[in-house]
Amino acid sequence: MYSVQNLISLISESGSLQPSKIIPILIKTKYPLPPGPPPLPIVGNLHQMSRSETWKQLVKLHEQYGPILTLKLGTRTIILLQTRAAVGDLLEKKAKFYSSRPRLITAGEHFTRSLLPVLMPYNDKWKELHAIRGLVLSHRVAKAVTCIQQSASRYLAFCLLDPKAEGDQSGGVNLGDAFCMYSCTSISTILYGDDIGSMSISEARQMDLIVQKLIKSLNNHNVLLDLFPFLEKTPGLSQLLTHQATPYFTELRTFFDAKLQTALARPCWTMSRTLAEKSPRRDRGSGDHDQLIFTTGEISMAGAATTPLALGALATMATLHPAEVGILRAQLDLLVGPDRVPTFADTEDLPYLHALINEALRLKTITPLGVPHAISSSPSDGPQVYKGYHIPDDAFVTPFQWAINRDPSVFADPHSFIPQRWLDSDNDTKNPLPLPSLFGFGKRFCAGQPFAGNALATALAVLVWGFTFEALSGFEGGDDDYRFVYHLVDTLLKDMKSEVSRCAWQ
């Protein structure tokens, strides 16, 4: 079959025929695309995608078409990987070919001007930045900064006890703000040297808002440019996008540049200082300073975006599964007792804590769709083929993390909440369970995973030790309910521990 869709895509992007790119596409391949719903001309399967909770539609398609799915969205081909075996075979074992990113006109080129490493293609610049970040996002550094996360978890408990401490004058407890504050104050201390407790809730909300604006840049009319790249040349549309993107870029650059400059002026160690010192480009002009701003800013945004959502998922599952949380609380009471707050060292002696975290993040996947990968092979490498299916060079190869985390070939009884499965896996040295799909795959695996894991373990230990989670009146949702936790959950502190928590922070 001829990949005509690929040909149209290339022409629409370049605006002209380029023989060096077109000829390999015209080579006939005997392999079909993976199965999927029949597309309409031009729009493909866009008419079948809703604007909200797209993942629920993908679940139905997954059940109908199997582990690998093809969708046509405009001129783009989406290859959805829906099993752990598929992502392992392609994104990990063949990472040499599957570690790039597709061209994202809106978020990548306009809103962040190709400076955000997570959206960069797999090239020499990305490899250089990846190596530098690996020096500061190591397990050794993650272990060294647990004292900061431990202090931040105590501040989290203090804020929940005294909402006015986080700037809420209403006297009510907002778990969303509390989790956002915990995440932002932890990462700002590690990355920029800020004192824990010095960040205002308005600053934490601003950091969260910056992330949300970037996510929203991928909806409405903006996404049309990524699905139909030839529209970029439409008079007025590119100017409209620039008009929207420039204020965001300026806001992001100004916010994180101010924090970076403060960090570099401090006499103490900060992760930003180490990144600046290790960067071979640090003295090569303003453009490289912008790259440093966005490299450090990306680390900050990653923590601000994922940790509050993960804590929300944990709190929601704690509400829905009180019996399992009761097991952990009993272990905490036995290990820690009522007279002190749990420490990070305690979490290392609580395997059930980590089992509960893994199971909660598996069953309530906070990002049902992962960041898409792109193929970086050359024509001399031949067509990419998997299980008898052709994977086009211009495809968005996307892990469907919701399905991967419920893969029945990996997780027995995959739709049930069973923390014990992770304890059994620890004893199975030949076939241990893979971590929940959340941090990416292959060369694009998030180096910040150990920091996030430590932050979640420390916070959850303090929350379960000191609080009881109860669903708000009228909530009847289950494990598949993706409403945010702070609309669902209330907290009641155990009286005997409230004063201990206050004194631990003060």
Image (cartoon, rainbow, N blue to C red):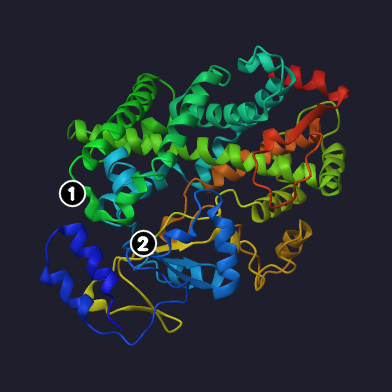
Where is 91 relative to 102, above or below? Answer: below
The Cα atoms of the two marked residues, 2 and 1, are separated by 19 Å
Q: Residue furthest top?
A: 169
Q: Is there any visible trace of residue 505 in the rendered image? A: yes
Query: Of the residues shown, which amino acid type is indicated by label 2?
Result: Val
Position of residue 67 measured from the top left corner of the image (x, y, whole percent): 54, 73
For the N terminus, the quadrant is bottom left
User: Label 2, on which residue?
Assistant: 43
Q: Amino acid at mark 1?
A: Lys
Q: Which residue is mark 1?
A: 233
- Asked whether the viewer can see residue 83, the reply is no
Where does the image place residue 446, in percent across and percent down from the top left?
Answer: 47, 50
Quarter of the figure with the C terminus? top right
Q: Give the side of residue 287 with respect to residue 192, left or right.
A: left
Q: Residue 422 occupies which quadrant of the picture?
A: bottom right
Q: Earlier in the sequence, mark 2 or mark 1?
A: 2
Q: Residue 487, how many percent across, how many down? A: 69, 34
Residue beneath the point at 65% across and 15% down? 165
Helix or strand or loop: what does disc 2 sit on?
A: loop
Residue nearer the viewer, 154 or 364: 364
Image quadrant where residue 275 sits? top left
Secondary structure at badge 1 equals helix
Q: Are marks 2 and 1 in contact (CB under 8 Å)?
A: no
**Relative depth, front residue between 145 and 231:** 231
In the image, residue 159 sits, relative to residue 81, either above or below, namely above
Where 272 sits versus 482, above or below?
above
User: Which of pointers 2 and 1 indicates the residue nearer the eye?
Assistant: 2
Q: Position of residue 92 (x, y in %)?
A: 45, 67
The foreground one among 229 and 221 is 221
Label 2 environment density (alpha carbons within 10 Å; few <14, some 14–19, many ≥20): some
**Residue found at x 70% / y 21%:** 158
